[in-house]
Amino acid sequence: MSGEARLVLASASPRRLELLRQLGLEPDAVASAELDETPEPKESPRRLALRLAQAKAARVACSNPDAYVLAADTVVAVGMRVLPKAETAQEVRSCLELLSGRNHRVWTGLAVIAPGGRVGSRLVETRVQFKRLDGREIDTYAASGEGQGKAGGYGVQGRAGAFVISLIGSYTSVVGLPLYETFNLLRGLGYPS
């Protein structure tokens, strides 16, 4: 190693990579950390988001001990009910039917492991209120494919932005990476930014 700080993004999410680039940071590597993301019995959505982010960072840090490893995990929940990362149009429909006309919370856990094993983490909560959606809006959005692969079955940065009545907290956290917390966590652990 040349002495320059290396940054590894422990996520295959194109949205997280794009958000990191908004900070002017280009990771030296992107490494996905595949984990079982099933909630533990009675685990709260907030605890799940933080646990998964920390586990992803730890897994990728094992093979990158000289790097700053950044990981995040986003959980969408209505009360204690965690919505899935929708993989099909039907799962997107089910999520939107549940979210229609309701408030929900988006929790993003953030973890950084620095060279030498120093660890920092944050949990960001954002409250989102959706308008009441009619069947046509739900069907059109589900058919677009945009909600597939996304926690809660929607991407606020796309067409679903038109469903949001209010958002209290971090918009970039709902997209997948809270920029304020990411920048300050990296800086606090000594990453040159």
Image (cartoon, rainbow, N blue to C red):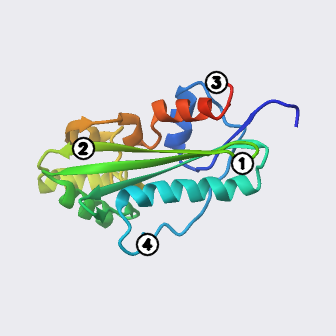
Amino acid, disc 3: Ser
Residue 128 marker: 2
N-term mark: 2 or 4: 4
Distance from the alpha carbon under mark 3 to that under mark 1:
19 Å
Q: Secondary structure at mark 2?
A: strand
Task: Note whether residue 151 is visible.
Answer: no
Distance from the alpha carbon under mark 4 to that under mark 3:
36 Å
Q: Position of residue 142 (x, y in %)?
A: 29, 56
Q: Position of residue 175 (x, y in %)?
A: 40, 41
What residue is at 62 percent from the left and 49 percent from the top?
Answer: 10
Task: Note whether residue 122 is visible.
Answer: yes
Decide if residue 113 is on the left or right side of residue 110: right
Q: Secondary structure at mark 3?
A: loop
Decide if residue 158 is on the left or right side of residue 55: left
Dot 2, crowdedness within 10 Å: few (<14), some or many (≥20)?
many
Distance from the alpha carbon under mark 4 to that under mark 1:
26 Å
Q: Secondary structure at mark 1?
A: loop
Q: Position of residue 109 (x, y in %)?
A: 46, 49
Q: Which residue is mark 4?
A: 40
Amino acid, disc 1: Gly
Q: Which residue is mark 3?
A: 193
Residue 89 marker: none
Quadrant location of the C terminus? top right
Q: Secondary structure at mark 4?
A: loop
Distance from the alpha carbon under mark 1 to that under mark 2:
35 Å
Dot 4, crowdedness within 10 Å: few (<14), some or many (≥20)?
few
